[in-house]
Image: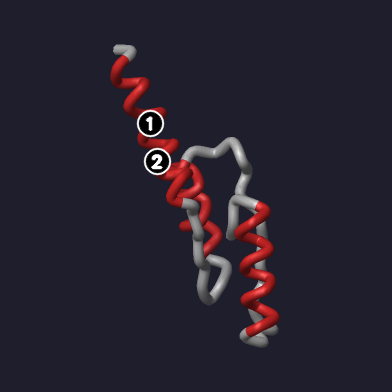
Amino acid sequence: MVDGETEQIYLHQLKQFENLKAISIKPDLPKKKSLRDQYELIKEEAKHYDNAIWLVDFDEILKHERELGEKENHR
């Protein structure tokens, strides 16, 4: 599962280059979900597949940490 357009393009190219026919690339994660919500969703989805890989951009992790820090500073 991927959360962005760039990741999807990268994975489609990787799939072609490595001839990975049995891999399904699904950009199914809702954009507005927090990292924790995405994590819970991927855990649930993993029950239905042999393997599930969740890619998260590091900039999303940094953004999440900034948002948490801002919430803490406003208390």
Q: Residue at 36% of width from left, 21% of height from top? A: 71
Q: Residue at 70% of width from left, 80% of height from top? A: 16
Q: Residues within 10 Å of mark 1 (few under 14, many from 20)?
A: few
**Farthest top residue in view:** 75
Q: Which element carries disc 1, helix, strand or loop? A: helix
Q: Residue at 43% of width from left, 43% of height from top? A: 36
Q: Which element carries disc 2, helix, strand or loop? A: helix
| Quadrant of image for the N terminus | bottom right
Q: Position of residue 26 (x, y in %)?
A: 67, 62
Instruction: Report if the CB atoms under discs 1 and 2 are less than 8 Å apart.
Output: yes
Q: Amino acid at mark 1?
A: Arg
Q: Residue at 49% of width from left, 38% of height from top? A: 34
Q: Position of residue 30 (x, y in %)?
A: 63, 43
Q: Which residue is mark 1?
A: 66
| Quadrant of image for the C terminus | top left
Q: Which residue is mark 2?
A: 62
